[in-house]
Image (spheres, rainbow, N blue to C red):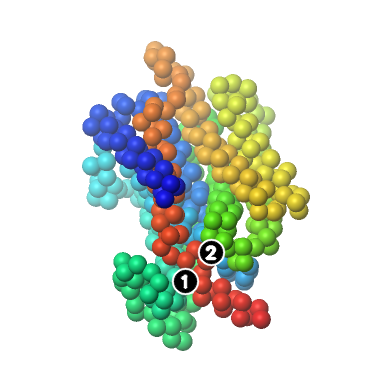
Amino acid sequence: MIWVSILLAFCLVGAFAYYRQLTRGLSVTNMGDYVSWGIYISNFVFFVAISLVGSLITAVLRLANVHWSTPLTRIAEIIAVSAIVFASIIIIVDMGRPDRFYNLFLYGRIQSPIMWDVIVITTYFFISLLLLYFPLLPDLKILLANKAAQPKWLTKMYTVLGTFWRGTAQQIRISDKAINILCITIIPVAFCIHTVTSWLFATTYRPGWDSTNFGAYFISGAFLVGAGAVVVAMYVFRRYYKLEKYITEIHFEKMGRIVVMLALLYLYFNVNEYLVPAFKMKRTEDEHLTTLFAGEFAPLFWFAILVGMILPICILVFKAGRKPLPMFIAGIMVVVGAWFKRYLIVTPTLLHPFLPMHDAPANYHHYFPSWEEWAIALGSLAGALLVITFFARVFPIIPIQETITEDEKAA
């Protein structure tokens, strides 16, 4: 109850801040002609990145016939759905005139990467929702069979969602086939969603974004932060829902190996992303990289690199580090470092355009979010956590029927 109250408080403050933005315009933010994206788009990229965990845990491991991941699939899909919902919301928040959002559908041009982003995000959301819903159907039947032990409103919800499920051989066959099709479909869509997002940056002629590496760079970072988020959720649900029997140390061991691999991969792309322009040292790239390595953004940059990648690798590369508590700490590091990394992808580049700032006010040379921006950003993060909390309270966080089936096969 305390946790939900805290999240609701953040959401209400964020809603009030957004009301101020709606009534007074984007002037309440510290964004301007140069930094026109700021913390909102940083949050958008962060949410999109985390959402890719659904395809990693549910689709890739399921298609690879990896059975140990079964208890983690619903956690991954809940995170994916909540993240992609708030990625969409934060884009609307970033619009100065959200009442004109419908123009995107009436007059959208397929030549624009923004239109591709809308299409692929919408597609990914519906596939993730179906991947969450289909495996839930057998569990709803189990919950309806025990309706005496639950509130009436929950029973009504379960009835609406799953009353048609009888568990016949034909239904199971159709459901399994549908899940496999969705798993195959979501992998290219998952790659597209972050590739298209990266193109929004790479097709904009700015130092720091003028890169052909951005697609792979974004995808590798997305898989890392998604895996880190699952590790954090595993620990929290395991501890507070007493799921030690289902989310075991073996799961942390295997997820630890995945996180190490993904962190090394993302570190490689980071070296590739910064080493090549640093070697060339074109003037505008020089200014941008100097700001990151030793200038205004250096503390955040080295924090993101050390805490988001290097320290988790140092912890998880050892067997003792792949125990639940060290894994939880490493997961927190990955997620926090990833958020700051997205902020650094957006802000320093916008402050260093190819054409120098002439006759611009002094405040245009710096950017720090206003309290309204912080409140809305934190409110969106709290909203995503609130959705995850709601799912965990209402539905089984561990797939019941799938786990029983896997145990029977193992026996």
For disc 1, the marked residue is: 135
Instruction: Residue at 66%, 36% (x, y): give it.
Output: 306
Q: Nearer the viewer, residue 193 or 79?
A: 79
Q: Residue furthest front?
A: 149
Q: Is residue 13 visible?
A: yes
Q: Which of the 4 quarters of the picture holds residue 166?
A: bottom left
Mark 2 residue type: Thr
Judge left or right: residue 78 versus residue 115. Answer: right
Instruction: Residue at 43%, 60% (x, y): give it.
Output: 393
For disc 2, the marked residue is: 73
Q: Position of residue 93 (x, y in %)?
A: 33, 40
Quadrant where the C terminus is found in the figure: bottom right
Judge left or right: residue 294 versus residue 139. Answer: right
Q: Nearer the viewer, residue 274 or 279?
A: 274
Mark 1 residue type: Pro
Which secondary structure lies at badge 2? helix
Q: Are marks 1 and 2 in contact (CB under 8 Å)?
A: yes
Q: Is residue 191 visible?
A: no
Q: Nearer the viewer, residue 237 or 114?
A: 237
Q: Between marks 1 and 2, how big is the CA–CA gap? A: 9 Å
Q: Nearer the viewer, residue 191 or 317?
A: 317
